Amino acid sequence: MTDSGQYGRSVLTLEAWRVRVLEHVVLLADEAFQRRAWFYEGPEMSSPEQDYAALFDVALFDEFVEMPANLLTLDQRRAGQRLCRLLDEFFEPVRGEFAQAEEVIEDPRWYEIRRAAKQFVESMKN
């Protein structure tokens, strides 16, 4: 049990949650990181599914974007909602299967996801 009294959830301040979300979204926007981590070309190790799970299961991105108390501007919320939608549309057909990193990295939809992630990060700087 965590400090919040709920199982599996820890207490984060809004600012710490925001930082956690941005850390994960920045990685989604970073093609160089993905090439290093997904193809074992650097010290990082990851996969498309791990990055997706980290964003939604660890950072709780969808909840962050929809939470009224998060003080997002309308543009920030829309950028976050768009990124959520693009990711869900991309991963929905492969749920329960592993998406092949070689296919994901070159998929035009993944380029659009990276672009949407960059837009969300930029919107959060305002």
Image (spheres, rainbow, N blue to C red):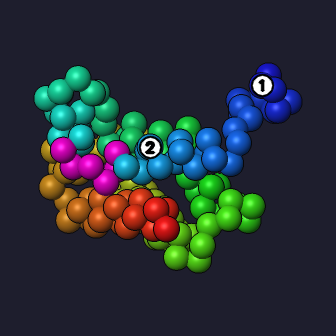
Horizontally, is 9 left or right of 111 in the view? right
Position above or below: 41 against 79: above
Classified by dominant secondary structure, the portion drawn in magenta counts as helix
Q: Mark 1 points at which residue?
A: 2
Q: Where is residue 41 in the image (x, y as percent from the top left)?
A: 13, 29
Span of residues in magenta: 27-32
Q: Can residue 26 be seen in this view?
A: yes
Q: Identify which residue is drawn at 59% across, 77% down.
A: 74
Q: Identify which residue is drawn at 86% across, 30% down.
A: 5
Residue type for callout 1: Thr
Q: Where is residue 32 in the image (x, y as percent from the top left)?
A: 18, 44
Answer with the quarter of the image where residue 17 lies: top right
Camera-side residue: 79 or 123?
123
Camera-side residue: 53 or 70?
70
Q: Is mark 1 on a helix, strand or loop?
A: loop
Q: Can residue 53 be seen in this view?
A: no
Q: Which mark identifies residue 22?
A: none
Q: Mark 2 points at which residue?
A: 23
The disc, 2 or 1, on the residue closer to the chain's N-terminal end is 1
